[in-house]
Amino acid sequence: MHIRSNLKALADARGASIRQVAQDIDYRFESVRQMYNDEMERYPRELLAKLCAYFNVTPAELLTLSSD
């Protein structure tokens, strides 16, 4: 089982670029890019909190559990 980021789907649904999301939540672009591309191994709590507030979702909607 793996934890997967759902950030790409959320950003795409809103029509927001990675750079725009990073600017809007005042967070490092590289960290947001890694999460968008599902390359992040550890998820900073501050980043998760900011993204949940920005997209108005729960952590369970931002991160999903995958069986692959």
Image (cartoon, rainbow, N blue to C red):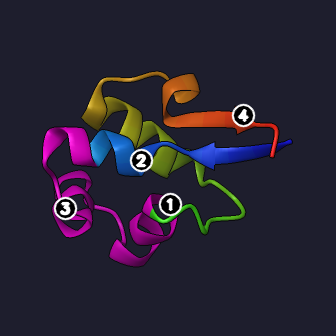
Relative to 31, is 14 above or below? above
Determine crowd level at label 1: few under 14, some 14-19, many 20+ residues with C-alpha closer than 10 A. Answer: many
Q: Earlier in the sequence, mark 4 or mark 2?
A: 2
Q: How far apart are the alpha carbons under marks 1 and 2?
A: 7 Å
Which is more N-terminal, label 3 or label 4? 3
Q: CA distance from mark 4 to mark 2?
A: 14 Å
Q: On the rendered structure, is 36 left or right of 11?
A: right
Under mark 3, the amino acid is: Ser
Element carrying mark 4: strand
Relative height, residue 36 to residue 47 (above, below): below
Split into 4 quadrants, where in the image is the N terminus?
Answer: top right
The residue under label 2 is which amino acid type? Leu
Q: Which residue is the extreme one toward the right?
A: 1
Residue hosting label 2: 7
The residue segment tinted magenta is: 12-36
Dot 1 and dot 2 residues touching (CB under 8 Å): yes
Under mark 4, the amino acid is Leu
Task: Report whether 16 appears left or right of 8.
Answer: left
For disc 4, the neighbor class at 10 Å (few under 14, some 14 to 19, many from 20) is few
Would you name the residue on which mark 4 appears? 65
How packed mark 3 is, by other alpha carbons closer than 10 Å (few <14, some 14-19, many 20 or more), is some
N-terminal of the pair, mark 3 or mark 1, is 3
Residue that numbered label 3 is attached to: 17
Residue 26 is one of the magenta-drawn residues: yes
The residue labelled by disc 1 is 35
Q: Secondary structure at mark 2?
A: helix
User: Front-most of 27 and 20?
Assistant: 20
Q: Are marks 4 and 2 in contact (CB under 8 Å)?
A: no
Which one is earlier in the sequence, the residue at label 4 or at label 1? 1
Instruction: Give the distance between the C-alpha atoms of the residues marked 3 and 1, in whole angstroms.
Output: 13 Å
The residue lying at 18 percent from left, 63 percent from top is 23
Figure quadrant of residue 29: bottom left
